[in-house]
Image: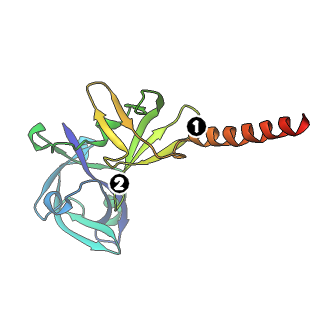
Amino acid sequence: MKLIVAIIGAAHGLKGEVKLDVRTDSPQRRLYPGATLETEPADVGPLVVTKTREYKGMTFARFEEINDRTTAESLRGVQLVIETDEDDVEEDAWYAHELVGLEALDPEGYELGIVVGLQPMPAQDLLLVREPDGRVTQVPFVRDIVTEVDIDDHCVIIDAPQGLFSDDELGEEDEVLGTADEESETADE
């Protein structure tokens, strides 16, 4: 299985340095000088890392095969990938491509939507769920909220706090409106 380590971004400077959109949790393990990375599309690689550096929260890299700005710009959007072994996978850890397309259910089994992505964040990742009305809800990917991930049954169970999903918000409004209607009916009598 191929996993994305980084995506090549804009050229930086004149000597072929590029900005990287890093997609791995351990860039020092994957993007060290001398590392050879396959590419998608495959015809532009493999690429050998000569140097990486961090600057203002961004990662920049140089590769043996890229020596000028023009070549660097032509590689914008190219994915740097590695082949992984299933034995490398941690327990209770999933790749984004395994989660996308899973049905999101509440603890009672009612559909909340479909998982459309995973957004890495500093504190915890966010599970992106497209609700039936088209709204995309960001669900903190923590055990207290996403209580179960079942790849075999093609679903995730989300015990969401009140108001996280749009149906919850509508339910609260209906309850408030219903109470107001009951009070006005009592006043009319």
Location of mark 2 (residue): 120
Question: Toward the viewer: 188 or 49?
Answer: 188
Residue 33, above or below 119: below
Q: Position of residue 108 (x, y in %)?
A: 42, 29
Residue type at tag 2: Pro
Tell me the crowding category of disc 1: few under 14, some 14 to 19, or many 20 or more residues within 10 angstroms, Cα based. Answer: some
User: Which one is in front in this view, the residue at disc 2 or the one at disc 1?
Assistant: 1
Q: Quadrant of the N terminus?
A: top left
Location of residue 65 (image quadrant): bottom left
Name the outermost residue toward the bottom. 56
Residue 158 lies left or right of residue 32; in this view the side is right
Residue found at x 25% / y 65%: 61
* Residue at 32% across, 56% down: 8
Mark 1: amino acid: Asp
Residue extending farthest right:
188
* Residue 186 lies in quadrant: top right
Query: Compared with residue 63, is residue 159 higher up or lower down, i.e. above or below?
Result: above
Percent x, y for residue 94? Answer: 25, 41
Name the residue: 23% across, 56% down: 25
Q: Say which of 142 and 9 sits in front.
A: 142
User: Which residue corresponds to the image point at 42% horizontal and 38% vertical from the top-left?
Assistant: 116
Residue 9: x, y in percent? 36, 58
- Cα separation between marks 2 and 1: 25 Å
Q: Which residue is mark 1?
A: 167
